[in-house]
Image (cartoon, helix red, strand yellow):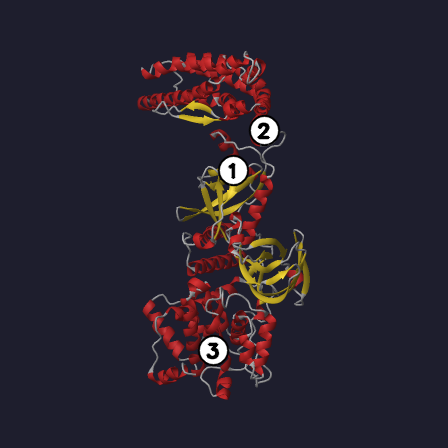
Amino acid sequence: SEPDLEKGLEMRKWVLSGILASEETYLSHLEALLLPMKPLKAAATTSQPVLTSQQIETIFFKVPELYEIHKEFYDGLFPRVQQWSHQQRVGDLFQKLASQLGVYRAFVDNYEVAMETAEKCCQANAQFAEISENLKARSTKESKDQTTKNSLETLLYKPVDRVTRSTLVLHDLLKHTPVSHPDHPLLQDALRISQNFLSSINEEITPRRQSMTVKKGEHRQLLKDSFMVELVEGARKLRHVFLFTDLFLCAKLKKQIGGKSQQYDCKWYIPLTDLSFQMVDESEAVPNIPLVPDEELDAMKIKISQIKNDIQREKRANKGSKVIERLKKKLSEQESLLLLMSPNMAFRVHNRNGKSYTFLISSDYERAEWRENIREQQKKCFKSFSLTSVELQMLTNSCVKLQTVHNIPLTINKEDDESPGLYGFLNVIVHSATGFKQSSNLYCTLEVDSFGYFVNKAKTRVYRDTTEPNWNEEFEIELEGSQTLRILCYEKCYNKTKLTKEDGESTDRIMGKGQIQLDPQALQDKDWQRTVISMNGVEVKLSVKFTSREFSLKRMPSRKQTGVFGVKIAIVTKRERSKVPYIVRQCVEEIERRGMEEVGIYRVSGVATDIQALKAAFDVNNKDVSVMMSEMDVNAIAGTLKLYFRELPEPLFTDELYPNFAEGIALSDPVAKESCMLNLLLSLPEPNLVTFLFLLDHLKRVAERESVNKMSLHNLATVFGPTLLRPSEKDSKIPANPTQPITMTDSWSLEVMSQVQVLLYFLQLETIPTPDSKRQSILFSTEV
């Protein structure tokens, strides 16, 4: 049609203008090569030559001829584009250029020798080395006087690059030349010549293009790839990063349209020779990371658990695969969202040319792993380079075939028959470590995966000045569908100045790291299992024991009613003539005295043996219990308090009222919810209510110091919710003898989440009004 034809011809002019611009740049590069040639030739005949005539001939072989050919082409094309009409013909110029491609054959054949000669001459002659690093090419932008520096190596590569692109140019032009146009047959002829020429030369060029970036004989290979969250102008973006043998590439997955296969868009890349890790003092790095409130993350986890539940239900009902497909898609969206929102640890990479990029990672282990892999590979890289847009496009396209991580690294890629991971408590004893070369201050941290990403769960004390630390500390770690336990060993750096600039991110240096798979079969037998994890020369001895959900959550009444653990709260307060059990007051008082600024207080596990010792002391009403407490790690005291509530034969919120609390929290009308929740709370038995309000005030005070101790109301609710609300066995929705002994269904995690929500609700209420009858006792309770 007429207007389309017009448009096509209009485009043709734009394509030609583009060709002119790129020709101009190319000519300026060739000129820059020719510039030193004349003085070098002149010097060659003197008594002090920089290079011999033979060397000059080899290095600059065919460059003058290439310049002539392209100058003629440019001079022919320029006026025709200036006096543009739709009838304007340019085909003859392209045809002529194509017929002269033979000069490139000679250039390409000589290219390798030219490069080697240039390198030798640079080593032998400082003057030439200086010249070859500073070749001035005039910038083709408006201002003619600007020049850009180029090295001989880059400029000699330009013709190789130019000839491989000659067919692309012709393709573009043909696309916008109507078949009826007199240029069409001429351009097709030029394209045919170029294609034949290229296919004959391509076998020789391809390895050569490789050798620009990778040592001779090696091809670029993918070493590692994974999903990562990049921080871009304060926003979190999901990226797929690829580590190749010579570069680090950050790409984003394009939206899939229709049935198209997936494609990547390259966001940026850094040659490994130009990459460094920019370290940041943690205090600096944190403010600009947008944190997502834990409530939102939890809401996502609830959604994920619900969708998984639905999928299982549909499978059992043998519904059509359409429904399941739809649910899986929803699951994948939620999981991507969770992956995007959860990590907060900065991992920065820096390009020597001045640009830095920040990723957010959830685990120090992964961050260390990426750094190691990149550093290892950097030892093998020597040259910097830049990719042409075509090369970059080809590389990015190859990512689709090469990628090893296909899904968001969460549950989607676990097939249903695979273990969904462990739910329950893992007790870990970190015994000791050997193999350190020199003595230093050492500690370990433990990470487990939950919902597909890793989180730090426990940290040993620092063992000072030793090559063989004996920690012998036991931790109880809660598992939510976990499959792997990781351990990292750090050297504690007390002295800030010792910090190498490079590792400034955490002031402590990672000495080693390792991981073990948590195998449900092996952990089934409830006994301690010893294991050794070796990490580059260091060996750490551990013991692990797993208790599945059902067993760990049983509230067992104590057989002897004289103690406080496992004894009903009413019996204890009556015996003590107190409003709030002595153990609760003692622990809270000690934590308020010295634990309010402890990072992760109530979340980080205390040493299990300390907790058992305190439990025994409280049970026999040992008079020295306060002395014992003052000498203990504050996390053990927090652990004792949690254990007390966990072992109550009936939860603080009572079995009877628990279902009502769970239903009240689900009400959508805020006014109705508040009145319902408060009425339920006030109908708790008096010792339960008073103890709860006492604890509630304490937890609010802990959260006020969140900027230091990193414990938000939500974190505290997560730790205490199940402890205070989980019903005892007879009323639990958890089957008493579940068919799968070790893996729990997700209905369990939904139940826990509702327990967390109930406690969070009370923590967030400004004030809790109490009727007069109770007010007396409550006022009184604060004085106990």
Please state the horizontal and vertical placement of residue 531, each as a whole percent of the image.
Answer: 68, 60
Neighbour tally class for label 1: few under 14, some 14-19, many 20 plus, Cα within 10 Å:
some
In the image, residue 698 above or below residue 382: below
Which amino acid lies under the numbered mark 1 shown in the image of this protein? Asp
Q: Position of residue 392 (x, y in %)?
A: 49, 33
Q: Are marks 1 and 3 in contact (CB under 8 Å)?
A: no
Mark toward the viewer: 1 or 3? 1
| Cβ atoms at labels 3 and 2 below 8 Å apart | no
Of marks 1 and 2, which one's residue comes earlier in the chain?
A: 2
Residues at marks 3 and 2, CA–CA distance in whole angstroms: 73 Å
Residue closest to the eye, 211 or 574: 211
Is residue 263 visible in this depiction of the protein? no
**Residue depicted at 50% across the width and 21% down the height:** 159
How far apart are the two marked residues, 1 and 3, measured between alpha carbons?
A: 63 Å
Q: Is residue 701 left or right of residue 220?
A: left
Secondary structure under tag 2 reads helix
Residue 351 percent across, percent down from the top left? 48, 39
Query: Which amino acid is tagged 2?
Result: Ser
Label 1 to label 2, Cα distance in Å? 18 Å
Residue, disc 1:
274
Return the residue nearer the eye: 124 or 382: 124
Q: Nearer the viewer, mark 3 or mark 2?
A: 2
Find residue 211 and name its label: 2
Quadrant placement of the C terminus: bottom left
Measured as percent of width and height from the top left, residue 428 is found at 62, 64
| Disc on the earlier residue, 3 or 2 | 2
Amino acid type, label 3? Thr
| Mark 2 closeness class: few <14, some 14–19, many ≥20 residues within 10 Å | some
In this rendering, position of residue 326 left or right of residue 513: left
Question: In the structure shown, which secondary structural element does the residue marked by tag 3 occupy?
Answer: loop
Judge left or right: residue 554 versus residue 694.
right
